[in-house]
Image: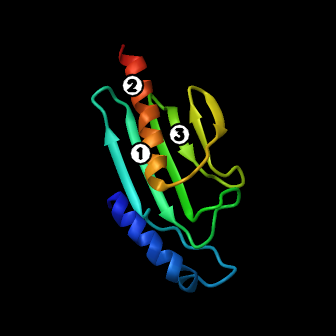
Amino acid sequence: MSVDAITEYMSFYAKYGAALVPQGKRMPRREPDFYEKRLFDDGATLEVKIYVVPAPVPGSTHRLKYSLFYGKDGRRLVGYDNERPKGDHRHCRGVEEVYEFSTVEQLVADFLKDVAAVRERRSG
């Protein structure tokens, strides 16, 4: 699913999503609205999961639940997520810090920029 498709789906969900889920009930486990997994020749893994949810995850102000991961040898090297109740945050170079979410496009761009910096540092 492309970023445009996610944006279109988010617009649909913003308009109709709340009617699809009974109030006060959790959504059942489901497949992500966007999923991508890449395996690199050096053994590293990049995995992106993005869900459109009916209400913001506690700690966030938008209606996305996401987990963006890049790691190698069982270690997370870069990660962006918004688990409850922490909200939007990133893990990079062993440090966890608040992430200022603006758009899904910027989220993915920031994540890929950090991944590129880590890959460059590890190869050079």
Quick check: 105 above or below 15? above
Label 1: few (<14), some or many (≥20) within 10 Å? some
Residue 38 location, quadrant? top left
Which residue is painted at 32% across and 61% down in the image?
A: 1
The residue closer to the viewer here, 43 or 17, is 17
The amino acid on which the numbered mark 2 sits, given as a three-letter code, is Arg
* Label 3 sits on residue: 79
Q: Residue furthest top?
A: 124
Q: How many marks?
A: 3
Quick check: 21 above or below 33? below
| Residue 32, x across and y down, in percent | 44, 62
| Residue 118, x across and y down, in percent | 44, 25
At mark 1, the secondary structure is strand
The amino acid on which the numbered mark 1 sits, given as a three-letter code, is Glu
* Label 1 sits on residue: 47
Label 2: few (<14), some or many (≥20) within 10 Å? some
Which residue is painted at 59% across and 40% down in the image?
A: 90
The amino acid on which the numbered mark 3 sits, given as a three-letter code, is Gly
> Could you tell which of marks 3 and 1 lies nearer the N-terminus?
1
| Residue 63, x across and y down, in percent | 57, 65
Frontmost of labels 1 and 2 is 2
Please report contact status of discs 3 and 1: CB closer than 8 Å, yes or no.
no
The residue closer to the viewer here, 99 or 78, is 99
> Is 97 on the left or on the right of 21, as rendered?
right
* Numbered circle sitting on residue 119: 2
Report, in whole angstroms, how far the alpha carbon at label 3 lies from the one at label 1: 10 Å
